[in-house]
Image (spheres, rainbow, N blue to C red):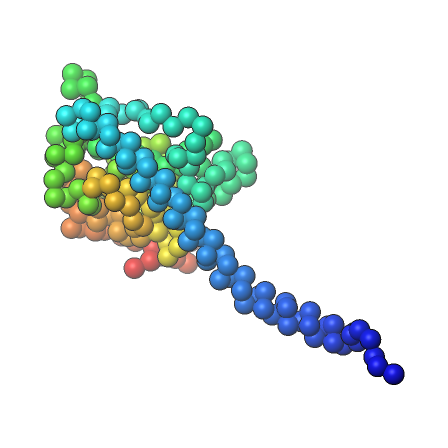
Amino acid sequence: MKRKGFTLIELLVVMAIIAMLLAILMPALEVARRRARSLVCRTRLRSLGLCYNLYTVDNDSKFPQAGWKADTEGTDIYLCPSATLTDKENAINPYKAYKKGFSYGLNSWVSDIDTTSTESADFPYKDRWTSTVAAGSQSYNVPLMGDSGKAEGMPKDDDWAPKKYGEKGDHMTRFVYDRHPRGTVNFVFLDWSTRGVKLKELWRLKWHKSFNAGSGEPRNGWPVWGDKGVKIKYYD
């Protein structure tokens, strides 16, 4: 008489094999998901770059004043797909939107301002880009907008490197949000290209005209992973 079905031992072996395959595949699937989210993020940033580009075309190459936003009502264009939830929704950094529908921050050194206004000596008008013409051949290295914990920031070359996400301090801390594979922060630049930047590279970008991008290091050095209070890994 032929046996029908499987024995308990055979079923357990099959289940064990399936569990092993899932254990092998799940990390690879998670990496694939993170890469897909990063691609969508860069696509959204590129679209925002296009909005700014169109603005400059209509305004003699000048950038808008601080506070200007593209009319994108009904879209998620200002939202990184890896950071869609806020504090109230129990999100954690760096995967947290600073406001409902917003997880990108503007490099405000590109914003034009009312030249009749009084400006702090710490953020002089002469260091602002204000137009696409001013950036010239350096435009590929001048950030326009990217992953951030605030709506805007004006980093300086001697800004401190934070030990943890969301740490209060210099403006560079607002962009230390590595949400993407290989510990990168996504940006759109003034040549309208997008790319991921590692945390240490943030100090080598040309944030404003006088920014010493060659220094490439914060004045407090790099916090070391494993030291007390250090929650961010600064990869080489």
- Asked which quadrant contains residue 98, the reply is top left
Q: Where is residue 168 in the image (x, y as percent from the top left)?
A: 37, 37
Residue ID at (55%, 36%): 89
- In this orientation, which residue lies closer to the viewer: 65 or 153? 65
In-image side of 225 versus 128 (left or right): right
Q: Where is residue 57 in the image (x, y as percent from the top left)?
A: 19, 28
In the picture, which quadrant includes the N terminus?
Answer: bottom right
In-image side of 36 versus 143 (left or right): right
- In this orientation, which residue lies closer to the viewer: 64 or 220? 64
Position of residue 100 relative to residue 21, above or below, is: above
- Asked which quadrant contains residue 182, the reply is bottom left
Furthest toward the front, the residue is 1
Furthest toward the top, the residue is 116
Furthest toward the right, the residue is 1
Q: Where is residue 23 in the image (x, y as percent from the top left)?
A: 57, 66
Residue ID at (43%, 31%): 75
- In this orientation, which residue lies closer to the viewer: 97 or 125? 97
Residue ID at (33%, 58%): 235
In-image side of 69 versus 22 (left or right): left
In the picture, which quadrant includes the C terminus?
Answer: bottom left
Whether residue 229 is visible: no
Q: Position of residue 122 (x, y in %)?
A: 19, 31
